Image (cartoon, grey):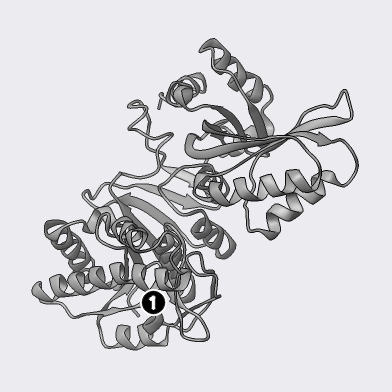
Amino acid sequence: MPKLIVQKFGGSSVANVEKIKNVANRIASYKRKGYNLVVVVSALGDTTDELVELAASISSNPSARETDVLLSTGEQISVALLAMAIHELGFEAVSLTGWQVGIISDASHTNARIVDIKASKIRQELKKGNIVIVAGFQGMTADMDITTLGRGGSDLTAVALAKVLNADRCEIYTDVNGIYTTDPRIEPKAKKIDEITYDEMLEMASLGAQVMQARSIEVAKKFNVLIHVRSSFSDNPGTMIIKEAKRMEGVIVRGITINKNEAKITICSVPDQPGVAAKIFGKLATAGVNVDMIVQNVSHTRETDISFTVAKNGLAETRKEAASIARTIKAGDVLVDEDVARVSIVGVGMKSHHGVAAGMFDALAKKKINIEMISTSDISISCIIKKKSAEAAVKALHSKFGLDKK
């Protein structure tokens, strides 16, 4: 039985006709070598953003179900065009939507989770010798409603299919050469990482690195799916995402991330008594607000301030809920600061090295960058700072931890 590879091509890789033909040629080169191929494709270029804007021009609060029906059309265009391009090269290919493939999800429209994948249609087409082109980012509920899997959901489609089909590996193609120590657009001295662990990649994706969707890394880690992140425009090796990297503990910090899509909310003059924090964050959770960092000031009176961060795309709802909660618990004003960013350092080696936090704070202090909030995990440290200082912070930390050196 020929080896099976699942490949995923992002929107930047299929942004126009020339790039679609380039992807088709790459796929054909693998087929000539005898591989079976399942190819997951995102929508062309900025199509998804354009569809979101189109919906917003119709309604200020469009139905989540209808939004999914609309957004799923982007990938249908991609898979059909790519299949046509492969046909032109003399190979057999068939395009399939998420629901034709049998990707069953829950009913959480616009951010659905995969429940099951039937994949029988894929297996049938592979037996016929076809290259199978799958629309990423989408699925179907048990009631046959179309769903989408959240931003970056094509990564999740590819990794999940690689697991279900027992693929030899999953290749994620993008417009960069792999995973870098930080965003090379901010720090030109950023270096490509040859190997990175699931834990490190999951942490980096969760903290703002945009190369892969965090949920896809969770699935890859759970089922030990080998991932190779590489460029659509080069044959050079990229970055392998694996269980354990060589000299894993020898590298203290693997990468620096930046996230400018955060806002800080402060509820002032909160009564300092047992159960108040539970009420605040319980109500926010019930409203579907995903809270990240939390800081409660030390109380010298009978009142305290509680600050927390949320993603900006949920800010309007969070502001409304926070104001309602403040009234209920008889707290003071609700302050919102959108002029913040989160910078983070990530590395499995941090578990076995001391002084990492001190080094991070020292590097920021030398640049006169004030830290507003701090959070830590076993393999990361994050700081909330003013947005205007974010890129300077990234460069300072990248240099501090020697990431600009091979």
Residue 178, relative to residue 158: is it above or below?
above
Q: Secondary structure under badge 1?
A: helix
* Image position of 365 with respect to 301: above or below: above
Q: Is residue 5 in view from this perspective?
A: no
Height in image: 328 above or below 404? below
Horizontally, residue 404 falls left or right of residue 249, namely left
Label 1, residues with CA under 10 Å away: few <14, some 14-19, many ≥20: many
Report the number of numbered marks. 1
Left or right of 250: which side holds 126? left
Reading the image, the residue beneath label 1 is 98
The image quarter in which residue 62 lies = bottom left
Give the camera-side residue of 209 and 199. Answer: 209
Percent coordinates x, y for residue 251 in the rendering: 54, 32
Q: Where is residue 4 in the image (x, y as percent from the top left)?
A: 36, 72
Is there any visible trace of residue 131 in the rendered image?
yes
| Quadrant where the C terminus is found in the figure | top left
Spot occupied by residue 309 in the image (x, y as percentages of width and height): 61, 40
Residue drawn at x 20%, y 61% is 23
Residue 140's place in the image compared with 237, above or below, is below
Q: Specify the amino acid type for callout 1.
A: Gly
The residue at 24%/60% (across/down) is 44
Tell me what residue is drawn at x 35 percent, y 59 percent: 52
Image quadrant holding the N terminus, namely bottom left
Q: Position of residue 263 (x, y in %)?
A: 55, 38
49 and 380: which is toward the camera = 49
